[in-house]
């Protein structure tokens, strides 16, 4: 967990507040699985029914875009390295462990009440809506966003069909599903 990253701090605080068992992971160095470097995960999270999730927190803003031209889209890009790393960690832990990409969206305070999607959370004076998608499903639908930067994302329709509030996976909190 990066303590200077407000998205990760907020996520950790939300997990603590909701009584969700979790382990933050120190990210100072790359880890190694079977002799090959792998991107570190951000948190191990115990979900509903005893299922473990390896998670990577991808903080985004809503609305996105430049200050003068806000775009009301839910950015869901990641790096291929993140996707590969979560899959490798989930496979290494075994036992039905799954990878989750967690998207805490920092919501413009003027829109906080009107956003009826995701798990609502307020921390350090900021408003968030938290969504997550299984990394295996993300991989099935992902497309290359930037070959140069190694980024991938999902088409909007695929993201809408796959994403769930984090509480869907943890069983804790009051879920609000993404409107159609």
Image (cartoon, helix red, strand yellow):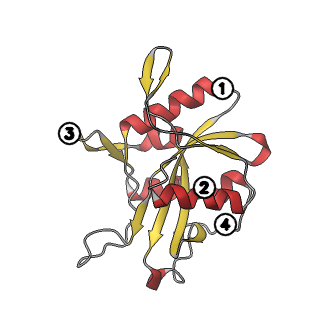
Q: Earlier in the sequence, mark 4 or mark 1?
A: 1
- Looking at the image, which residue is at 42% across and 78% down? 108
Q: Residues within 10 Å of mark 3 (few under 14, many from 20)?
A: few
Spatial CA distance of label 4 from label 1 is 28 Å
Q: CA distance from mark 3 to mark 2?
A: 32 Å
Judging depth in this view, the residue of 15 and 92 nearest the camera is 15
Callout 4 touching callout 1 (CB < 8 Å): no
Say which of 163 and 39 sits in front. 39
- Residue extending farthest to the right is 49
Where residue 166 sits, quadrant-wise, is: bottom right
What number is the disc on residue 12? 2
Label 2 – label 1 distance at C-alpha: 24 Å
The residue to which callout 3 is attached is 148
> Helix, strand, or loop for circle 2?
helix
Give the CA distance from mark 4 to mark 2. Answer: 18 Å
Q: Residue at x 43, y 18 (%)?
A: 36
Which element is circle 4 on? Answer: loop
Going from the N terminus, do you reach mark 3 or mark 1 first?
1
Residue sitting at the far top? 35
Location of mark 4 (residue): 175
The residue that mark 1 highlights is 94
């Amino acid at each position: 967990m990066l303590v200077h990253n407000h998205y990760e701090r907020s996520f950790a605080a939300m997990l603590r507040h909701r009584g969700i068992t979790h382990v933050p992971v120190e990210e100072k160095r790359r880890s190694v699985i079977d002799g090959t470097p792998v991107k570190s995960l951000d948190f191990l999270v115990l979900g509903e029914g005893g299922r473990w999730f390896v998670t990577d927190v991808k903080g985004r803003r809503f609305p996105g875009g430049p200050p003068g031209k806000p775009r009301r889209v839910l950015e869901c890009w990641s790096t291929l390295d993140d996707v590969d790393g979560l899959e490798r960690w989930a496979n290494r832990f075994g036992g039905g462990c799954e990878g989750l990409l967690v998207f805490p969206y920092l919501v413009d305070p003027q829109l906080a009440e009107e956003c009826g999607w995701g798990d609502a959370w307020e921390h350090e004076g900021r408003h968030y809506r938290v969504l997550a998608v299984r990394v295996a499903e993300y991989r099935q639908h992902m497309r290359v966003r930037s070959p140069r930067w190694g980024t991938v994302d999902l088409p909007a329709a695929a993201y809408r069909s796959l994403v769930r509030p984090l509480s869907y996976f943890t069983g804790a909190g009051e879920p609000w599903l993404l409107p159609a």
